[in-house]
Image: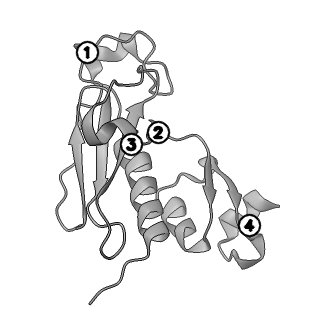
Amino acid sequence: MRVRAAFPTLLVALTSSSLLLAGCSTAPSDAENAASDGCITDFDPSVDYLPDKSEIVDAENFSITYEKSYQVLTVDEPFTGAQPESYVLVKCGAPAPELSGDLAAAPQIQVPITSLYSGSTTHLPLVTELDELDVLTGVSNGSYVSDAAVIGRID
């Protein structure tokens, strides 16, 4: 039996999705609707602001569905025996979607993220590998950090 820790699995899934998936650029034809940071500046509900769809090949235990201005990341079993948990990743500049059913209570997170606190140093290599250290704004205990680039941000 494989036991999954809830917080690390969730943080890795959210960090990966937020940094990799939700930061997708807008389609070239929609350039007039996007600021230089990729955020929507003139929202049009008919435009697909997430034209680059990720295909999950080797990963398990989560799924991603796409709408025009947001994605739904669902962790199937956040920890052993748990019910699925969903997170709504809303493209910055888009209005908060009106959700119903199970998604009505789901957390909505604006993406791409601009600030990330890491509660565990095990997540820091992922942020470093993604070359997204500029969003790292805090760590739980700097004395456990061994990555030189992260230490440079702490000092």
- Residue highlighted by disc 2: 109
Q: Position of residue 29 (x, y in %)?
A: 25, 15
Q: Residue furthest right?
A: 155
Mark carried by residue 93: none
Nearer to me, 58 or 36: 58
Q: Secondary structure at mark 1?
A: helix
Q: CA distance from mark 2 to mark 1?
A: 26 Å
The residue labelled by disc 4 is 151
* Chain-order first, disc 3 or disc 1: 1
Determine which quarter of the picture holds residue 105: top left
The mark lying in front, picked from 3 and 1, is 3
Depicted 20 relative to depicted 146: above or below = above
Would residue 53 be visible to someone looking at this image? no
> What residue sits 74% from the left and 57% below the top?
153
Distance, label 3 to label 2, CA atoms, is 10 Å
Task: State which tag comes first along the sequence, 2 or 1.
Answer: 1
Residue labelled with disc 1: 29
- Report the residue marked by disc 3: 106
**Point 24% across, 48% down: residue:** 64
Residue 63, horizontal then vertical, whole percent? 23, 54
Q: Position of residue 148 (x, y in %)?
A: 69, 70
In the foreground, 92 or 82: 82
- Labels 4 and 2: the sequence-earlier one: 2
Residue 1 visible in rendering: yes
